[in-house]
Image (cartoon, rainbow, N blue to C red):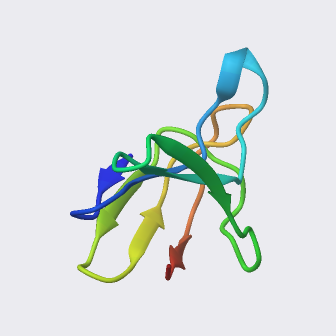
Amino acid sequence: MLWTGSAALVWGGRPYSSTPTNQGWRYLPGTDSWSSFSAVSAPTARERHTAIWTGSKMIVWGGSDEIVAPVAGGGIYNP
């Protein structure tokens, strides 16, 4: 999870002991609302990864898959 200055962005993870996901969500505190964002060209499902905010894009890198094997590579989310 990371903070953009106006929204919290969450990518991937392992919800409720299921398999890792390749979905993302945006939280807007001003409206107290969550929304999902597109998974088009998204990185593969993962957990325990790193995400950083560049000032305009979120970069997701590394992590592990459903059998906790390392995942190479990542992706960029451009809101």
Residue with the most extreme front position: 31
- Above or below — where is 19 with respect to 58? above
Relative to 43, 27 lies left or right: left
Q: Residue at 26% across / 78% down in the picture?
A: 54
Question: x and y percent of residue 71 in the render?
Answer: 60, 54
- Total of numbered circles in the picture? 0
Question: x and y percent of residue 34 in the render?
Answer: 56, 45
Question: x and y percent of residue 40 in the render?
Answer: 77, 77
Q: Nearer the viewer, residue 25 or 59?
A: 25
Q: Nearer the viewer, residue 15 or 75?
A: 15
Q: Residue at 68% across / 42% down in the picture?
A: 65
Relative to 9, 72 lies left or right: right
Q: Nearer the viewer, residue 42 or 10?
A: 10
Q: For residue 19, what is the image quadrant?
A: top right
- Above or below — where is 50 with respect to 43? above
Q: Residue at 32% across / 83% down in the picture?
A: 56
Q: Residue at 60% across / 47% down in the picture?
A: 12
Question: x and y percent of residue 17 in the render?
Answer: 71, 16
Q: Nearer the viewer, residue 68 or 9?
A: 9
Relative to 35, 54 lies left or right: left
